[in-house]
Amino acid sequence: MTVKIIVILILGVLAGRFVFEPSFYGVTDQLLSLGLSLLLFFVGIDIGRNKQAFQHLKVLGFKILLVPVSAAIGCIFGGIIIAAIFNMRLLEGAAVASGFGWYSLAPVLIAPYSSELSTIAFLTNVFREILAIVFIPFTAKKIGYFETVALGGATSMDTTLPIITRNTDAETAVVAFVSGLMMSLMVPILVPVFIALL
């Protein structure tokens, strides 16, 4: 599955570079939304038919929130460490890491502070999503299912959810959706907070 995804991504890059005219790019947003909606619909069907997953989630209760909270803390701590290594301000690293993979929002929130940091946030969050797509199957097989959710960050409720679902189980897919939703809600709060503290 991972090889297929990488090949399709490379084919898309080549098609965008050599095949399609710039006039086509206006349609890509609509096609992307439609494709993602269909993908999530079928993932929802797969989750919905597994009644045991929902029963187990009732047992977990508020413990389910530990996944997004610990993933968020890990991301921010990692961002601070990287900022220290690259001689950046520590809170800049925290702000970039608080994008949690949401590459279309985090750079916009950071842009008024610094266009350079906004670019770093964009690239960091794009690479995070790509690396999550590549490493989720390996992580599910060798480390654990909930760890795949942390890899996806905010994207575990949309773009990486199908990959998490395919490589784990229905229970983890529900946790992934909840975690992605929670982390997505944290982005517009945490990024501005860290920027305001600079």
Image (tube, rainbow, N blue to C red):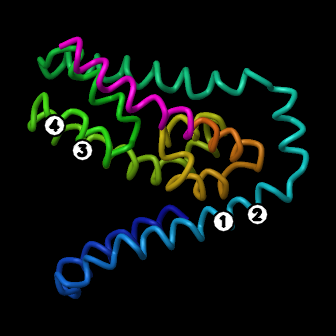
Query: Mark 2 and mark 1: span between their CA atoms?
Result: 6 Å
Q: Residue flagged by tag 3: what amino acid is it?
A: Phe
The residue sitting at 48% across, 40% down in the picture is 154
Question: Relative to 113, is 21 above or below?
Answer: below
Query: Mark 2 and mark 4: span between their CA atoms?
Result: 39 Å
Mark 2 neighbour class, 10 Å CA radius: few under 14, some 14 to 19, many 20 or more: few
The label shown at residue 45 is: 2
The residue sitting at 39% across, 42% down in the picture is 101
Q: Residue under circle 1?
A: 41
- Pick whichever of labels 4 and 3 is earlier in the sequence: 4
Q: Residue under circle 3?
A: 122
The one nearer the camera, 114 or 141, is 114
Q: Residue flagged by tag 1: what amino acid is it?
A: Phe
Q: Residue flagged by tag 4: what amino acid is it?
A: Ala
The one nearer the camera, 82 or 196, is 196
Mark 1 neighbour class, 10 Å CA radius: few under 14, some 14 to 19, many 20 or more: few
Query: Mark 1 and mark 3: span between their CA atoms?
Result: 28 Å
Query: Mark 1 and mark 4: span between their CA atoms?
Result: 34 Å
Disc 2 + disc 1, Cβ < 8 Å: yes
**Residue range highlighted in magenta:** 180-198
Q: Residue flagged by tag 2: what amino acid is it?
A: Ile
Q: Which quarter of the picture shows residue 41?
A: bottom right
- Pick whichever of labels 1 and 4 is earlier in the sequence: 1
- Pick whichever of labels 2 and 3 is earlier in the sequence: 2
